[in-house]
Image (cartoon, grey):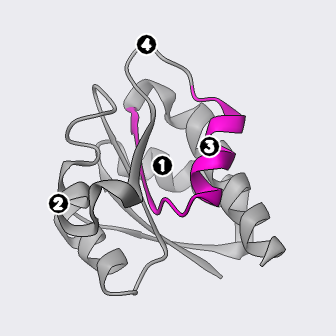
């Protein structure tokens, strides 16, 4: 079971995309950015997903502060599109917190979850 902590804007939209992609293989918790990041830091969640209007600011600022810059990545900034190969690389590199613009949630979240599930089945 992969545990996903969700913060930022449009949390329910993120949760829906996570569940539609991961089904019974994922468990989600919606919380504030701070609490969701602390869950990952404490090992109570495996990954953090967050969204904001820009994709690079508030979506990850708390996660970067608590988990460290090297564990976090923006996958889709405002006006940009997520790239599956880039997301797969980030997951392989050990990133555990992902930020995106709200406009990219429907496209980015399934890519992230698929990459996480694929990566966890390889281990």
Crowding near the residue tagged with mark 2, few <14, some 14–19, many ≥20 C-alpha atoms within 10 Å:
few
The CA distance from mark 4 to mark 3 is 17 Å
Q: Which residue is mark 3?
A: 87
Chain-order first, disc 1 or disc 4:
1
The CA distance from mark 2 to mark 1 is 22 Å
Chain-order first, disc 4 or disc 2:
2
Asked if the residue at tag 1 contacts the one at tag 2, i.e. Cβ–Cβ closer than 8 Å, the answer is no
The CA distance from mark 3 to mark 2 is 21 Å
Residue at 36% in and 56% down: 70
Q: Secondary structure at mark 2?
A: helix
Compared across the picture, whether 23 is left or right of 51 comes to right
Using the image, tell me which numbered label, if any, was put on residue 65: 2
Question: Is residue 90 depicted above or below 43 in this figure?
Answer: above
Q: Secondary structure at mark 4?
A: loop
The span picked out in magenta is 82-101
Using the image, tell me which numbered label, if any, was put on residue 34: none
Q: Secondary structure at mark 1?
A: helix
Crowding near the residue tagged with mark 1, few <14, some 14–19, many ≥20 C-alpha atoms within 10 Å:
many
Q: Could you tell me which quadrant the N terminus lies in?
A: bottom right
Where does residue 60 sit, x and y in percent of width and height?
A: 27, 48
Asked if the residue at tag 3 contacts the one at tag 1, i.e. Cβ–Cβ closer than 8 Å, the answer is no
Residues 119 and 109: in front is 119
Q: Which residue is mark 4?
A: 79
Chain-order first, disc 4 or disc 3:
4
Q: Which residue is mark 1?
A: 14
Asked if the residue at tag 4 contacts the one at tag 1, i.e. Cβ–Cβ closer than 8 Å, the answer is no
Is residue 98 in view? yes
The CA distance from mark 1 to mark 4 is 18 Å
Q: Nearer the viewer, mark 2 or mark 1?
A: 2
The CA distance from mark 1 to mark 3 is 16 Å
Where does residue 56 sit, x and y in percent of width and height?
A: 29, 34
């Amino acid at each position: 079971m992969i545990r996903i902590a969700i913060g930022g804007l449009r949390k329910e939209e993120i949760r829906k995309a996570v569940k539609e992609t991961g089904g019974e293989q994922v468990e989600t918790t919606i919380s504030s950015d701070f609490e969701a990041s602390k869950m990952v830091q404490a090992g109570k969640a495996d990954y953090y997903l967050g969204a904001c209007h820009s994709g690079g600011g508030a979506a990850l600022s708390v996660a970067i502060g608590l988990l460290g810059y090297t564990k976090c990545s923006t996958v889709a900034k405002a006006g940009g599109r997520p790239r599956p190969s880039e997301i797969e690389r980030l997951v392989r590199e050990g990133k555990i917190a992902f930020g995106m613009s709200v406009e990219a949630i429907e496209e980015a979240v399934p890519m992230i979850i698929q990459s996480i599930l694929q990566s966890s089945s390889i281990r």
